[in-house]
Amino acid sequence: MSLNEHTFKLVIIGDPMVGKTSIINRFIAKTFEHSYHQTLGTQLNCSEIIVGDVLIRLIIWDLAGQPRFESVRKLFLLGSDAVVVTFDLTRADTFDNVEGWLQAFRQAVPDEAPSVLVGNKVDLASKRMISVAEAYQRHINLEFDNYFETSARSGENVGELFDQVTRLLIYNRLAELREKLHPFIYSSFAS
Ligand SMILES: Nc1nc2c(ncn2[C@@H]2O[C@H](COP(=O)(O)OP(=O)(O)O)[C@@H](O)[C@H]2O)c(=O)[nH]1
Ligand SMILES: [Mg+2]
């Protein structure tokens, strides 16, 4: 692996039916499906983004939200570099469950991995149950790095979401590298 290539594992989690698979499909394939297909186990998607002369490879893990896959879910959270926790702006129960999803992630991934909160289905304005202010406040309280309102249906903010996650990942990786290299660069004469 060259220094100019970085691969990251990004997991997208949240209750069933909030639109996780749709957000990824919108980002990767630029498509949207109206019918619902339950995600079985795990689905992997890869996206390559070039920032300056650095190639960023984002492996996006789409985890099944069904409770019966809980053991699988725990395993697949391990080793993640970042998380997107998604809820449905039209279903308050999915917003209530955000904290539980974040906790599960932080238990499996103890580092300072970036986390972004996403309220999806912003196109369904008349059915909206959660206000921007409420969601924004929760992202602060739960110490998410950012909050986005997306629509996998219209594509609104989907590109911006992955762009932001990528930036957070690079920023984090640079901080890690800096820490690792520090003793080699600033070694004392005494040692
Ligand atoms: N109106 C609208 N429907 C959406 C949006 N995203 C997903 N859906 C629909 O919500 C349902 C569940 O989506 P899916 O991506 O399978 O959810 P997942 O279980 O979280 O992966 C499907 O019928 C999608 O067509 C959105 O942004 N707006
Ligand atoms: Mg799915």
Image (spheres, helix red, strand yellow):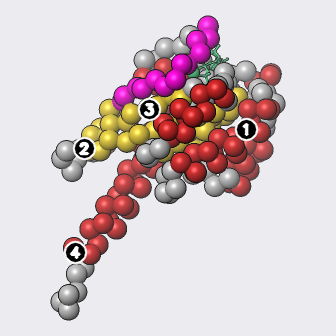
Q: Is residue 136 visible?
A: no
> Is 114 one of the magenta-colored residues?
no
Q: Residue at x 59, y 15 (%)?
A: 38
The local secondary structure at tag 4 comes to helix
- Disc 4/disc 3 C-alpha distance (Å): 34 Å
Q: Position of residue 181 (x, y in %)?
A: 26, 68
Tell how many labels: 4
The local secondary structure at tag 2 comes to strand
Residue under label 3, please give it: 60
Q: Nearer the viewer, residue 128 or 95?
A: 95
Image: magenta residue range: 35-47
Mark 1 burial class by Cα count in 10 Å: few <14, some 14-19, many 20+: some
The local secondary structure at tag 1 comes to loop
Left/right of residue 14 with respect to residue 81 in the rendered view: right
Residue 185: assigned label: 4
Mark 2 burial class by Cα count in 10 Å: few <14, some 14-19, many 20+: few
Q: Is residue 70 visible?
A: yes
Residue under label 2, please give it: 5
**Type of amino acid under label 2:** Glu
Q: Residue at x 44, y 32 (%)?
A: 60
The local secondary structure at tag 3 comes to strand
- Disc 4/disc 1 C-alpha distance (Å): 45 Å
